[in-house]
Amino acid sequence: MSVPTSPADLYRHSLRLLLDKDISAWVDLWAGSGLMEFPFAPDGWPGRLEGKEAVAAYMRRYPDHIDLHDFPELRIHETTDPETIVVEMRGVGRLVETDAPFDMTYIAVVTVQDGRFTSYRDSWNPLAVLEHGADFTGSTR
């Protein structure tokens, strides 16, 4: 399957890869110099990831800690910039270590150029990661 190039289609494809736990393919959707930002990251969590390798390192252990089942309430809003979308959604599943429910609210501003993520500002709920078993980053908190 070819990788979609419109921002909305690429984003939907990326969610399918996360549900399939195919982190390697998800990272392949990134431009080499892509930037991922977390404006509301709690202390000890990264606020900025510069480059595809940093994004890969951040996501590497994600499926070992969070088992995503669905992204309900997905809304993708186009902007006046054809390369940028605003996404509202929830990610639901379970925390692997504790089997507790996982339910995260997200708002993201995503820019795509040449079919790759170049900027991804992920405003997720920082309270959700305070749950035991949610820390997949190896943070120092």
Image: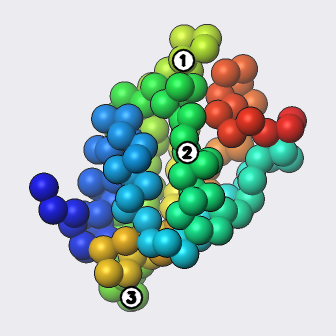
Q: Quadrant of residue 7?
A: bottom left
The N terminus lies in quadrant: bottom left
Q: Does residue 68 sit above or below 55 in this rendering?
A: above
CA gap, disc 2 and disc 1: 15 Å
For residue 24, side relative to residue 138 (left or right) = left
> In the rendered view, does 68 fall on the left or right side of 121?
left
Mark closer to the observer (2, 3): 2
* Amino acid type, callout 2: Met
One can see residue 122 in this view:
no
Between label 2 and label 1, give the one nearer the viewer: 2
Number of the front mark, 1 or 3? 1
What is the spatial separation of the Cα atoms under label 2 and label 3, in whole angstroms?
30 Å
The answer to which quarter of the image holds residue 20 is top left
Residue drawn at point x = 70 percent, y = 63 percent: 48
Q: Secondary structure at mark 1?
A: loop
Secondary structure beneath dot 2 equals: helix
Residue occupied by mark 1: 96
* Residue at the spot of label 3: 80
Q: Secondary structure at mark 3?
A: loop
Residue 66 at least partly seen: yes
Residue 59: give its label: 2
Q: Which mark is residue 37?
A: none
For marks 2 and 1 on the same chain, the one whose residue lies earlier in the sequence: 2
| Residue at 53% from the left image edge and 25% from the top image edge | 64
Looking at the image, tell me whether mark 2 or mark 3 is earlier in sequence order. 2
Amino acid found under the numbered disc labelled 3: Thr
For mark 3, does the 10 Å Cα neighbourhood hold few (<14), some (14 to 19), or many (20 or more) residues? few
